[in-house]
Image (cartoon, helix red, strand yellow):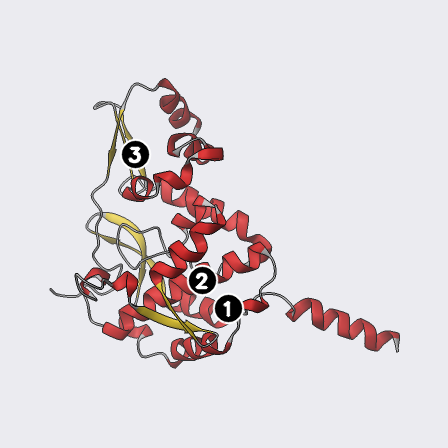
Amino acid sequence: MKRLVLLFVVCFSTNAYAYDFKNWETLLERYVTLSNIHGISLNVVDYASMSKDPEFQTLVEDLKKFSPKSLKTESEKKSFWINVYNIFAIKVILDNYPVKSIRVIGSMFKPVWKRKAGMVGGKHYTLDHIEHGILRKTGDPRIHTAIVCASVSCPDLRREVYLPSKLSEQLDASMKNFLINPKKGFWIDKKEKTVYFSRIFEWFEIDFEGEYGGVVNFVRQYLKPEQVKYLQSGVYDIEYFDYDWDLNTLSPVSP
């Protein structure tokens, strides 16, 4: 009897939380690789090959049947929706492939962000809904370097899934990796006395205020000591990188 109870506890503790994204991680390992586009180093996606892989469609179909109401903890919910955003951003591309940019999907009156991207638990979701209606409401600005809208200037798509058990560590790593990219994340030009940030920090500046003390104060914890020292001097202008909306693809798509 004790053995049966122990077996039940082990099984329950193994499967009781979150969603199993193992097939998503397999796809990431299979189709995401480091490359360079327009002089910017980034992780790119082999959309052409992924579009032919039945495992992606299986992933999409499985999400349709999963109820997010079964997610209990904050880390379970946050990691789940970060993964789903990234999956649905890719789904949008694959549904319209080949495309040069995610922004060409949709129209001026109904841009891609507000179009149905995929289903979870029998309910349609847009990328806007997931980003603004769910993830931003968690109050964690690190989500902005975890969700990837399939573009060159977006944060890199990680080659692993976000997990509840190590979510904070992964979010810190994603923020740090984005900030060390001098072409799209963060760069100090001492000669011109200018500090460059990704447009993401301008668009979502309000998310870094309050308890976080603003963008500059927030990013210090992820920078090198000499960079922190320069920021503390305050003698610089702040500019933002141009945002490259071209597809983060292994195989460039002609206009």
Q: Residue at x 48, y 48 (%)?
A: 171
Across and down, in percent, residue 206 comes to 37, 39
Across and down, in percent, residue 240 comes to 24, 37
Q: Which mark is residue 83?
A: 2
- Mark 3 Cα-neighbour bin, 10 Å: few <14, some 14–19, many ≥20: many
Dots 1, 2 in contact, CB < 8 A: yes
- Mark 2 Cα-neighbour bin, 10 Å: few <14, some 14–19, many ≥20: many
Mark positioned earlier in the residue sequence (3 or 2): 2
Across and down, in percent, residue 25 comes to 46, 66
Tell me which amino acid carries mark 1: Phe
Residue 38 position (above or below residue 124): above
In terms of image quadrants, where is residue 200?
top left
Q: Which residue is mark 3?
A: 187
Q: Which residue is mark 1?
A: 21
On the question of residue 23 being in view, the answer is yes
153 on left or right of 104:
right
Furthest-left residue in this view: 255
Q: Residue at x 42, y 44 (%)?
A: 175
Across and down, in percent, residue 217 comes to 42, 30
Residue 80 position (above or below residue 141): below
Q: Residue at x 58, y 64 (%)?
A: 71
At mark 2, the secondary structure is helix
